[in-house]
Image: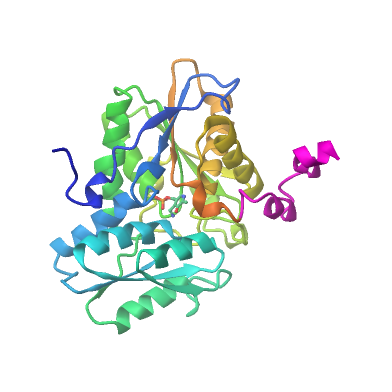
Amino acid sequence: MNYYNSIIETIGNTPLVKLNKVTKGIRGTILAKVEYFNPGNSVKDRIAIRMIEDAEARGILKPGGTIIEGTSGNTGMGLALAAIGKGYKCIFTMADKQSQEKIDILRAVGAEVVVCPTNVAPDDPRSYYSVAKKLNRDIPNSLYPNQYDNPANTAAHYETTGPEIWRDTDGKITHFAAGVGTGGTICGTSKFLKEQNPTVVSVGLDTYGSVFKKYKETGQFDEGEIYPYLTEGIGEDILPQNVDFSVIDHFVKVTDKDAAIMARRLSREEGLFVGWSCGTAVHGALEWAKENLTDDDVLVILLPDHGTRYLAKIYNDTWMKDHGFLEDRAFKTARDIIH
Ligand code: PMP
């Protein structure tokens, strides 16, 4: 019989899929690593199980314990799936800008969700970082994995994402691109790939309103770079310990609008029904590729999650129009033409 002992065993080994339409006019082979094939529909399943097993091995998570994490939703889903099999409770703190779908999904798999205000400083007691830390202090036998600073996050990508890409490209990858939130994905993967071939170039995608690009280029933590933005899961107003700037060669910033439009193009033109930050990753990586790729290059762009989590936002035409992301003419439907 061919079966898995639990859903956890199905994490990883996601496919590489060639992008054919949105890459028109760009040289080289451009492949997407499609992380929505993970059981929680995102790349974060990889780090969730790795952080839990690391805490178990170190004796800081014991049977019957409670896992508490600040999450934009995807890490919560991964932790919740792993917790079910292992018998832990989960409490997640989330910023109120995150999609309602993400909150509903976490509750559907049995987690408790505490929604916190988005536009407060990270050290404000109301922020989702501070509330997670307080719950961890007050609840006995609780674990706060803290994906931002936990080395098991980067390690998960060093041990799985990097080796899978190296194996599936037969070592031919020349460029790797991924959005940067905690930094785990890009840094763990890039570190592994650069160890195999030091000429592999790593491109980090950042958002307007986030500090990463400026910090890489000037070494300054510039608070002037911090302002509200809408894209979920990438960009930060802090410097997580998992961001190792020495393995990220370049940063490209992408607007909320360009990211949303590219995510919709990936769905309609490539059949890849992906999340908002996947649009950031592809838009930014292709902008960079236009100037820098040659015919022999192989660029892998990591797509973190699935489009279902953004149905009420970027996949809703009214929402898109309300945010100035769609022109009116995009609303011409069959009905408009008939009448
Ligand atoms: N996109 C989405 C949707 C995410 O949830 C995350 C994780 N915050 C990222 C991108 C960025 O990945 P990482 O945290 O590994 O940098």
Residue 307 located left or right of residue 13: right
Snapshot colouring: rainbow
- Quick one: quadrant of the N terminus? top left
> What residue is rendered at 55% in x and 55% in y?
210
**Placement of the C terminus among the 4 image quadrants:** top right
How many labels sit on residues?
Answer: 0
Q: Residue at x 25, y 55 (%)?
A: 49
Residue occupying image coordinates x 36% and y 50%: 184
Find residue 328 and report its horizontal and vertical position in percent.
80, 45
Quarter of the image where one finds residue 247: top left
Instruction: Indicate whether residue 147 is drawn in magenta.
Output: no
Closest to the observer, 155 or 70: 70
Of 241 and 222, which appears nearest the observer?
A: 241
Q: Is residue 144 above or below residue 282?
A: below
Q: Nearer the viewer, residue 91 or 108?
A: 108
Task: Name the outermost residue toward the top.
Answer: 295
Q: Position of residue 181 (x, y in %)?
A: 45, 53
In this view of the protein, which residue sits in the foreground, 190 or 92? 92
- Please indicate, yes or no, whether residue 246 appears anywhere in the rendered image: no
Q: Relative to 136, is 315 on the left or the right?
A: right
Does residue 246 lie above or below 25 as drawn? below
Left or right of 55 in this view: 190? right
Q: Position of residue 332 (x, y in %)?
A: 78, 40
- View extreme (right): residue: 339
Spot the residue most to the front.
338
Residue 305 visible here:
yes
Span highlighted in magenta in the image: 313-339
Residue drawn at x 60%, y 36% is: 265
Q: Is residue 126 left or right of residue 56?
A: right
Q: Is residue 314 magenta?
A: yes
